[in-house]
Amino acid sequence: MTGAARRAAVLGHPIAHSLSPVLHRAAYRALGLDGWAYDAVDVTEEQLPAFVGDLDAGWAGLSLTMPLKQTVLPLLDHVEPLAAVVGAVNTVLVQAGGSGRPVLTGANTDVHGIVAALSEGLGAADAASPGESAPARTAVVLGAGATAASALAALAELGCTTPVVLARSLGRTGALARAAHRMGVEPAFRTLDGAPAALAGADLVVSTLPPRAADDLAAALREGPALRPGAVLLDVAYDPRPTALHAAWLAAGGVAVPGERMLLHQAAEQVRLMTGRPGPLAAMDEALGSALGVVPGSPEAPGAPVVPGATA
């Protein structure tokens, strides 16, 4: 065994579908951290304070998914600057404290994951149409929750600071608007009613909607205006695989990045933060493909987004 045994877990509600244990356990094996354990624990917003209060020095960290990324904020001792600006924490680091209780630091690796996944998509678009792709200028974010705030920060890193945000209800965009203001992003907020036209004018689209919530939009997309050449979609949902939106985007001629690419990259960054060693991306990628039942070398294998004409 390399290093002292530590525990980590992904928390959320529901959580049974999570692929995070597959990724983190593969990383521990590749790093020789034989005594490390990583589990999925169903925790509601109401249960989170008690769970966090019971953490001890045997814990390395937590991964957080819906609906805990904002609920955890007042429970932490420190929040890293990026997570504070975004207003969402998906990673909690448990570190030794002088008072006998651990020090809890909140971080955000979703931004890293989204940037890396979109960059894969942009690379695939360039490879499919050499010399035809232009730098991304316009972007659309679907949804207005915690992951949408991370998407705005990621798009800003890629040079887009005036995206369009399409929400199911404009009355629930206040927190996202405040986060956008903190990060110097100026989004235009609209409802999902005009989504097909907005998507047709975008170079980059990030859907942060829950699984199957974009199915109606996918149907409308099939009948809507043509997409921009090389337009890239990242649908953060990955169940079912492919999502209806992913399939419709491909059918319309776009480049689609499946949601597990974001999951992979943000998990590798979490491993780095929790273990102090670079996340073994290749080993994690291989384990992800195996868990998804993907045949190595197939068009849908991990490592590359899907381009028009490939099997989704």
Image (cartoon, grey):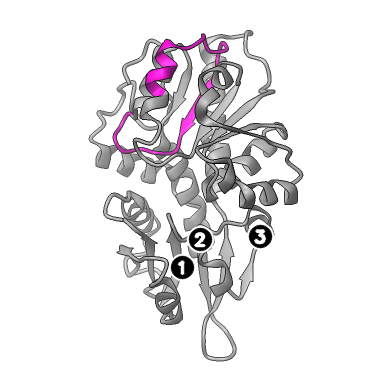
The mark nearer the N terminus, 1 or 3, is 1
Where is mark 2, residue-wise? 91
For the residue labelled by badge 2, is the local secondary structure a helix, a strand or a loop? strand
Q: Is 58 one of the magenta-colored residues? A: no
Pick the front one: 144 or 57 = 144
Residues under numbered marks 1 and 3 in contact, where contact means CB atoms less than 8 Å apart: no
Tell me where residue 122 appears, x and y as whole percent. Answer: 56, 24
The mark nearer the N terminus, 2 or 1, is 1
Residue type at mark 1 is Gly
Left/right placement of residue 37 relative to residue 82 reads left
Where is mark 1, residue-wise? 61
**10 Å neighbourhood of mark 3: few (<14), some, or many (≥20)?**
some
Q: Nearer the viewer, mark 3 or mark 2?
A: 3
The mark nearer the N terminus, 3 or 2, is 3
Instruction: Give above or below for 166 relative to 74.
Output: above
Where is mark 3, residue-wise? 84
Q: Is 225 one of the magenta-colored residues? A: yes
Residue type at mark 2 is Thr
Q: Is residue 150 visible?
A: no
Q: Main secondary structure of the magenta part?
A: loop
For the residue labelled by badge 3, is the local secondary structure a helix, a strand or a loop? helix
Left/right placement of residue 285 relative to residue 99 reads left
Residues under numbered marks 2 and 1 in contact, where contact means CB atoms less than 8 Å apart: yes
For the residue labelled by badge 1, is the local secondary structure a helix, a strand or a loop? strand
**10 Å neighbourhood of mark 1: few (<14), some, or many (≥20)?**
many
Give the residues in magenta. Answer: 218-242
The CA span between labels 2 and 1 is 7 Å
What residue sits 42% from the left and 66% below the top? 45
What residue sits 44% from the left and 17% below the top? 221
The CA span between labels 1 and 3 is 18 Å
Residue type at mark 3 is Ala
